[in-house]
Amino acid sequence: MTDLTDETPMANLCELISRHPDSIRHAAITAAETFAWYAMPDLVRSRAVRTVLKTGILVDLVRRSLPAHWFGGAGEVDPWADSDTSDPWAGSDQGEAASAGTPGEVLRTVTENPAGALPPLTLVGGVAALGIAASVAAEKCLFRKGEARRARGNAVGHTVVALPLAALTFAADLTADIVLAQVDQGAK
C-alpha cells in the first residue's frame, strides 16, 4: 500500500477513488439518502407522503447494509464456502460458535444469566433502545428547529441542516469503509 501523504491532494484523491470506487459510491448514495431524509419536509409538506418516502429510504439503507449473499445473486459470496458442509455450526474455523454446538445451545449460552449478571442480549437490547430513543429525540429536535426556520420565512429551513448532515455522513461512511477494507487486507 502506498503512503498517500507523499503526493499532492489531487493525486491523493485520485488514488483514493481508484482504490475504493465501491466505498465512494456507497458513501455517496448514503449521503444522498441522508440529505433527502432531512431536507424532505421542505419539498414534501404531506406527512403521509413523507412517511412513505422515508420508509423507502430506510428500506434501501437497511438493504445495502445487509451482506450481499443474503440476496443470493449470481456470483455472490458463499458464507460457508470454507466449510465442507452447509451446517454453519460445523467446522473448527468458525471459532467459538463451532465449539458452542447447535444454534439452540449458542442461544442458551448467550441468554443465560450467570451469577446474576445481565444477559448479553439484554445489554445489547438496552443499548439499542437507548440509541433509538436518542435518535428519535434528535430527529424531533432537528424537525422542530427546521419548522421554526420555516416559520421565520426561510423556505429551506430543513435543507440548511440536511447539507452538513449529508457531508458528515459521506465522510463517516467513506472513512469506515476504507478503514474496514484496510483491516480486511491486513487480516489476509
Image (cartoon, grey):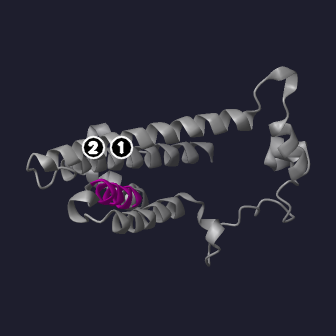
Which residue does the image show at 41% across and 68% down from the upper left? Answer: 52
Which residue does the image show at 58% across and 40% down from the upper left? Answer: 128
**Per the image, is 56 magenta?**
no
**Per the image, is 28 magenta?**
yes
In which quarter of the view is residue 118 placed?
Answer: top right
The image shows residue 157 at horizontal and vertical percentages of 17, 50
Q: What residue type is disc 1 on?
A: Lys
Helix, strand or loop at label 2? It is helix
Residue nearer the viewer, 43 or 63: 43
Q: Which residue is mark 1?
A: 140
When the figure is inspected, residue 61 is found, relative to residue 72, above or below; the finding is above
Which residue does the image show at 85% across and 44% down from the upper left? Answer: 106
Residue nearer the viewer, 33 or 7: 33
Q: In the visual, does 156 lie left or right of 31?
A: left
Judged from this view, the residue extending furthest toward the top is 115
Tell me the number on the disc at residue 24: none
Q: What residue type is disc 2 on?
A: Arg
When the figure is inspected, residue 55 is found, relative to residue 6, above or below; the finding is below
How crowded pointer 2 is (Cα within 10 Å; few <14, some 14-19, many 20+) is rated as few
State if disc 2 and disc 1 touch (CB < 8 Å): yes
State which quarter of the image contains the N terminus.
Answer: top left
Judged from this view, the residue extending furthest toward the bottom is 74
Region of the chain picked out in magenta, as a range: 26-38
The image shows residue 93 at horizontal and vertical percentages of 81, 49
When the figure is inspected, residue 72 is found, relative to residue 13, above or below; the finding is below
Helix, strand or loop at label 1? It is helix
Q: Which residue is mark 2?
A: 144
Q: In the visual, does 175 lie left or right of 84?
A: left
Whether residue 8 appears in this view of the structure is: no
Whether residue 171 appears in this view of the structure is: yes
> Rounded to the nearest whole Å, what is the CA distance between mark 1 and mark 2?
6 Å
